Amino acid sequence: MTFLTTDENKTISFEVSIDGTDTSPEDIKLIFECGKSEISISGIAEEGKITFDIPAITKSDYPTSILEKEMVNSRLEMYVEDKRFVPWKGQFDIKKSVKINVNSLEENKKPKKKEIKASQPIVEEVIPKKKEIIEETKKEVVKKVKEIQLEDIKVNTNFGSHF
């Protein structure tokens, strides 16, 4: 099913073959039925093809009854050798255009405060680690002091025996 939109022009073409005459069709129209009124758009016939340039459906070009519909009945009408023919009847969906409006944003000059959330308190996690480091450092210092004292004792006892 073909559709018309409320904000874009549309070109619609029909392939038509006319047998029994060499006369080209005249007064070619695509007609939209809008309640009690009809809208008629003229078409152009060239090389077995009929083309219609349909303007966007706006309030200024069409009656409001077509703008309220989602589907419109239509027909192709033409005259060949002064005889009226309706070779096609169908419907067109009418799609309303999507509109997005943006209002200007208000600038906030004050920076927003950012909250930091942790699954466990950070302070509690750092303090035990700091205590562990201090304890390890104390142990290493005590160990070095004892090593130095032992070396000093060895040095003193070694010197004492030589004198």
Image (cartoon, grey):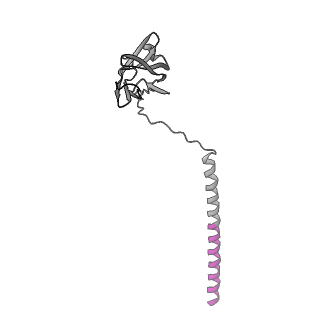
Horizontal side, residue 114 vs residue 62: left or right: right
Residue 50 point in image, percent of width and height: 38, 27
Main SS of the magenta part reads helix
Decide if residue 64 is in sight here. yes
Q: Which quadrant would the C terminus be assigned to in this image?
A: bottom right
Residue 65 point in image, percent of width and height: 45, 13
Q: Farthest residue in the front direction?
A: 20
Q: Residue at x 65, y 88 (%)?
A: 161
Residue 121 point in image, percent of width and height: 62, 45
Residue 57 quadrant? top left
Decide if residue 62 is in sight here. no
**Where is 70 relative to 145, above or below?**
above
- 91 or 84, nearer to the observer: 84
Q: Residue at x 65, y 70 (%)?
A: 143
- 141 or 33, nearer to the observer: 33
- 106 or 152, nearer to the observer: 106
Question: What residue range appears in magenta?
Answer: 140-163
- 10 or 147, nearer to the observer: 10
Magenta stretch encompasses residue 149: yes
Q: Farthest residue in the bottom direction?
A: 162
**Where is 18 relative to 37, above or below?**
below
Residue 54 point in image, percent of width and height: 38, 24
For the image shown, how many numbered marks are present on the structure? 0
Residue 111 quadrant? top left
